Image (tube, helix red, strand yellow):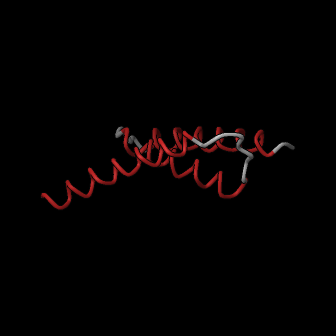
């Protein structure tokens, strides 16, 4: 099977499982969902190594968003 297709299928399955699991436990914070989606994306890339023809802009955007979320959480902890 093509690496790109495998990556997309596995990523979709991981995201669906994450949404169902977090919804089942009643999680409502968007930052938790985005953080887990980001981690799943990077784990999928590390394990499956899909071929990319251009720069991976999604990875860069997810990393920046993840760093902003972590920064906000750390600031909340330090300031309280």
Total count of labels: 0
**In this view of the protein, which residue sits in the foreground, 10 or 58?**
58
Kindly give the residue lying farthest to the front in the view shown. 54
Kindly give the residue lying farthest to the bottom in the view shown. 78
Dividing the image into 4 quarters, which one contains the C terminus?
Answer: bottom left
- Which residue is rendered at x = 33% and y = 54% of the image? 70
Q: x, y (%) of residue 59?
A: 54, 45
Q: x, y (%) of residue 66?
A: 41, 49
Dividing the image into 4 quarters, which one contains the N terminus?
Answer: top right
- Which residue is rendered at x = 54% and y = 39% of the image? 58
Q: Image check: 56 left or right of 5?
A: left
Above or below, 35 relative to 47: above
Q: Image check: 2 left or right of 50?
A: right
**In this view of the protein, which residue sits in the foreground, 50 or 29?**
50
Q: x, y (%) of residue 62?
A: 48, 44
Q: Image check: 59 left or right of 70?
A: right
């Amino acid at each position: 099977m093509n690496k790109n297709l495998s990556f997309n299928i596995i990523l979709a399955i991981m995201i669906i499982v994450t949404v169902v699991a977090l919804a089942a436990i009643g999680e409502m914070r968007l930052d938790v969902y985005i953080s887990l989606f980001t981690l799943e994306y990077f784990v999928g890339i590390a394990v499956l190594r899909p071929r990319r023809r251009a720069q991976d802009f999604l990875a860069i955007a997810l990393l920046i968003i993840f760093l902003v979320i972590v920064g906000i959480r750390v600031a909340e902890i330090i300031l309280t």
